[in-house]
Amino acid sequence: MLLILGASLMDACNVSRATDGLVLGVREQIAIEMGGDPVDVQLFPLQDPPRPEPAQLHNYVQGGAQLGREPMLEDEVSTFHIGFKQQLRAVRRQADFYQSLSDVDLLISAGANDVLDKMEHSAEFLDVLDTDDRRDDCW
């Protein structure tokens, strides 16, 4: 069993999905390299996580997640956090299930949303990108 936690790079549809079919992106390639089948996956949206069932991949990833609890999403019933800490809490609630298995591995994808947040709020960093020809700007 492979548990996947993190942000949008590994989100298989808990928050959003760019396609209706299987696309061998980073998530699938890593899962295959780690011996998993990217088709045998159970998704765990944090607003209403299901009970874990046997599957090669358990995906707790939430697109837009940061390392803390943020950001928050809203559905018709509630507002809820989707950050990495919330994903860890969701996994911990299922500890009995995971401890009953013979092998559980963990893949964490983290950092990009935190980096982007810091870049947006850092005048010093943006000053570095302010060059004469402006072809190196990140926007």
Image (tube, rainbow, N blue to C red):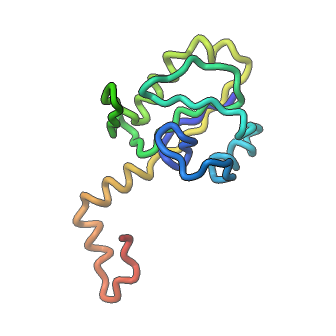
Between 19 and 1, the residue placed more toward the observer is 19
Q: Could you tell whether 22 is left or right of 126 in the image?
A: right
Instruction: In the displayed orientation, state which residue is furthest to the left.
Output: 123
For residue 89, above or below residue 126: above
- Identify the residue at horizontal 69%, vertical 42% (top origin): 31
For residue 118, above or below residue 64: below
Where residue 45 appears, as percent x and y from the top left, is: 49, 30
- Identify the residue at horizontal 72%, vertical 38% (top origin): 39
Where residue 44 appears, as percent x and y from the top left, is: 53, 29
Where residue 42 appears, as percent x and y from the top left, is: 62, 29
- Identify the residue at horizontal 43%, vertical 35% (top origin): 84
Where residue 96 appears, as percent x and y from the top left, is: 59, 11
Instruction: In the displayed orientation, state which residue is furthest to the bottom.
Output: 133
For residue 123, above or below residue 90: below
Q: Give the number of marks.
A: 0
> Where is the N terminus found, in terms of image quarters?
top right
Between 124 and 88, the residue placed more toward the observer is 88
> Where is the C terminus found, in terms of image quarters?
bottom left
Name the quadrant containing residue 37.
Answer: top right
